[in-house]
Image (spheres, grey):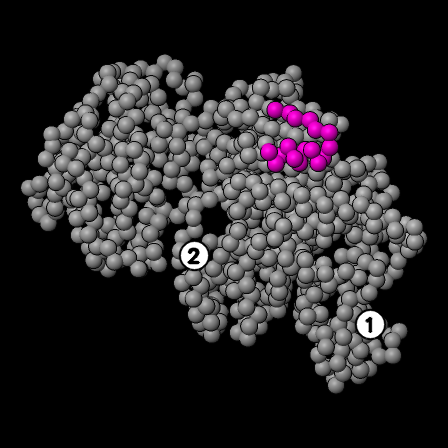
Amino acid sequence: MEPEEGKMGRYPRKGRKRKQAPNRLVGATEALRARWELEDRQPEPKKARLSTVLFTENCEITHGQLRELLKYAILGKSSAPKPSWCQLFHQNQLNNVAVFVLQGMSQLHFYKFYLEFGSLRKAFRHKFRLPPPSSNFLADIIGFQNRETAGYLPKIIKGSLLSTSSKANINLKNDPIIQKYGFKRVSLIRCLLTKEEMKTFHFPLQGSSDCGNFITTKYSGPITDNSPLFGLDCEMCLTSKGRELTRISLVAEGGCCIMDELVKPDDRILDYLTSFSGITKNILNPVTTKLRDVQRQLRALLPPDAVLVGHSLDLDLRALKMIHPYVIDTSLLYVREQGRRFKLKFLAKAILGKDIQSSNRLGHDAIEDARAALELARYFLKYGPKKIAELNLEALASQQELQGIGQQPRNTTILQHQNASVLECLDSVGQNLLLLARETDTVELPSSGNCQITKCLSNKEVLEQARMEIPLFPFSIVQLSFEPFSPVLTEEMNKRMRIKWIEMSTVYAGPFTKNCNFTALKTLFKGFGPVCSMTLVFETHQPHLCIQYEILEAAQLAIETLNGILLDDIYIKVQRPVTELTLDCDKLIKELEQDSENRDTIYLSGVSETFKEYLMQHSNLFIGLDAVILPKDLRSGNQKKYCFLKFKAFLNAQRALSILTGKYWKLKGRYALTPRHLHAWLRSSPPESRRPPGLRVIPPPTEKQALQTLKLDHPKIVAWRWSRKIGRLYHSLSPGTLCLILLPGTNSAHGSLSGLGLMGIKDEEESAIPSMGL
């Protein structure tokens, strides 16, 4: 399978009109969508979340790409490039990073003992291939380079956007902030806008002709340097009478939000301005609070000598239709050349080292913006104009504008040192790394003041230490070592594993009458998915069909749909071949359905170009749709007649499947069974490993050999035991822990085996995936 996916938005794309689907299909989906929106109205709480819709076709992630994610988890987008293969939302909500390395294991081990790895495969919905390991896997993922060959990289600066070199040769006298305020620290009163300035910048003032229906706060003064500051920010929408208030947030000087209200405008709304305000129709519909209500509340909250602080505060006060004479406007406090103004997002990063107005969030957070403006005013009062001028904001802003990265400012020092190691990233933010391993393991990591290496006598002791010490370190690596299989056994396991998936994807159907329409039968079975081969079997009393499908979902769908149906007055059977490799097939299918990676993905067969076009145009009708995976034929490059739809949660997938397989859409489908990385692995199967179903690979084991497999040191038992132990430890970690389980793969004279990675964030999907009951 060659998946090609693109992330789907919640709104249809704009552009030329495309051919519309039948009205009955639109009506059925619209009715279901209305019910879904009622259930999905509540906004999701902000917490760290992973998305892997950017996976490459073969889902193989290099050690360098893995290192990208680890560095981004430590530093965030302001100081490190985003990972190229996945997305980590709300990185600042992460509490810890824990990496478990299962040395000696590979992707083959995971799928050979798939049932035994139940604890891990159900806990982690994100899985990916790793290339075979190099001589030092740990050094690869940490990114350490020999100082003699690579040179020592300087420490990375986090926080301010300004690099040290840009501070040199600044002529402070020409800085507009110095020209206005001088070099010395200024008082709070000096930072207030004068009446003339408020008039110049169109603040609402008492007696102004356009403020006749405005109300005043209870201001009476006098203002002193001890007067309280309050951060204010408002969000607006566009109505038939212009911009009107939809949200107000007020933050006290200690940072506590004392008022946060949604407001229903009196006039008809033309545009919610959601990309700025974050307000939607669904959010505002149940609101009953009016402008007069928040005016009354604001008058009650503000003391007589209150100073309001905001960014472009004139717009907020006009939206409130209120007059207050004591204001600090941070867009005017931090003076810029030629009357221009710095953006709040830029000032928050440059001055405070904080990222606000994240692109991952819909609209601005009024509380966050109010708090940022308040902190900027306090910073100015505390450090004075000279400190601000030394930052050379004008030069930095101009540099950003030239580089075209105003939307996502980045640390200029980081851009010069993208090859920094994970250790150096941790050191730059004053954090330490914990490494737990056995004494017999070779650990080639640098001796560093921020790397604590603890050696243990056994895997059991490593895990016990991990349970106690992982919560104490922001970044931990736990290495467990297992005896690798012999090369001969590994080769045999690899061959049998691939053959098992071929047999599981093969079905026998019959009996059929000798006069049946075999052309129609072939069309019927091809409707469930792509077919590798289809042959007639005449060894039986009545003819049968042997169909080998390209993917497991198609074979399972054929069995579930056709087994036991009446065809030409004969009840037919549709079943898999019974061999030693398919005896546990029913159990395996059930477990594959419960795999956390498959639970939120559905498989659809018989999809036409018209349906694909409709799906791409109306993706917003399917709540929670994350990606559409459209496989292509390897030779022709044409898209195949099936697809996978990946959703954010199981309930979203369940809802979509129920309607898409209903009478209106006439599609065949079920839940996915095979992760994308597994398709890529099986597709690389050499031709000689493919055998006709039913043939044996090796002679049956002797009784002594069979009993030997039941001993506790058998690899199957080892996989089961350690999967449960690591699973329990994962579930004991604190919420917000990014956890990676890495099976590095193996190398030998007989060939290399690719590795496998599993990752997730603790409590990321507790509502989407049922409890495992470990």
Which quarter of the picture shows residue 457? Answer: top right
Q: Which of 615 and 446 is in front in this view?
A: 446
Q: Which amino acid does label 2 sit on?
A: Tyr
Q: Is residue 428 left or right of residue 405?
A: right
**What residue is at 65 percent from the left and 49 percent from the top?**
119
Examine the rendered structure and indicate whether residue 490 appears above or below residue 154. Answer: below
Find out whether residue 480 is within the magenta segment: no
Spatial distance from mark 2 to mark 1, Cα to Cα? Answer: 48 Å
**What residue is at 25 percent from the left and 24 percent from the top?**
381
Q: Nearer the viewer, residue 667 or 515?
A: 667
Find out whether residue 459 is within the magenta segment: yes
Q: In this view, does 669 lie to the left or right of 203?
A: right
**What residue is at 48 percent from the left and 66 percent from the top?**
19
Q: Which mark is residue 11?
A: 2
Q: Which range of residues does the magenta coloring cover?
A: 452-468
Is residue 82 in view from this perspective?
Answer: yes
**What residue is at 67 percent from the left and 43 percent from the top?**
725
Secondary element at tag 2? loop
Q: Residue 536 carries which label?
A: 1
Q: In this view, does 87 lie to the left or right of 329?
A: right
Residue lying farthest to the bottom in this orientation: 569
Examine the rendered structure and indicate whether residue 563 appears above or below residue 670. Answer: below
